[in-house]
Amino acid sequence: MSIDAQTEAGDESQSVEEMATELGEAITRTPEYRRFEETKEAVEADEEAQERIKEFEQLRQEFMLARQTGEATQEDVQRVQEAQEHLHALPVMEEYLDAQEELETRLEQLNEAISAPLAVDFGQQAGGCCEDE
């Protein structure tokens, strides 16, 4: 490989990285992303939501431990589900979850646009996005 070819390949790589950075910055300016951030901040500022999140996480951790030791019961599953439903019933959480779903849909659309010319699911190959929920 000649020095010119190496320089050209390096320039292309830098250009692709710059475009990726620009894409990330553009995503942060979308209405879906801004709404997600706003609703996330609202959840973080809501004392009742934070308390219910703690309760849910505590129950979930206890359930996971019980499941690992083979001691989980159907009652344990039901308690975790009820805590999650109780948490998700808060209007601030409903808004957040709705905004999260809208953002995920938008990111899936962008993934498809990026993946089409590559003949590969870019987002899946890159480790996905938002697979927490």
Image (cartoon, rainbow, N blue to C red):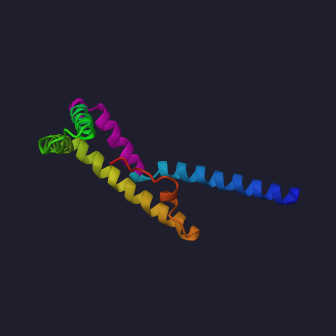
Any magenta on residue 48?
Answer: yes
**Image location (x, y in percent) of residue 32:** 39, 53
Majority secondary structure of magenta residues: helix
Image quarter hosting the N terminus: bottom right
Q: Give the extent of the magenta segment.
A: 33-51
**Image location (x, y in percent) of residue 49:** 23, 35
Q: How many marks?
A: 0
**Image location (x, y in percent) of residue 57:** 26, 35
Q: Quadrant of residue 46?
A: top left
Task: Residue at the far left: name it.
Answer: 75
94 displayed left or right of 25 = left
Above-or-below relation of 111 to 89: below
34 displayed left or right of 126 = left
Above-or-below relation of 113 to 28: below
Above-or-below relation of 72 to 108: above
Measuring 59% from the left and 49% from the top, which residue is drawn there?
21
69 displayed left or right of 9 = left
121 displayed left or right of 73 = right
Measuring 48% from the left and 61% from the top, which residue is drawn there?
110
**Image location (x, y in percent) of residue 104:** 38, 55
Q: Quadrant of residue 53?
A: top left
Measuring 43% from the left and 60% from the top, which residue is drawn there?
108
Any magenta on residue 120?
Answer: no
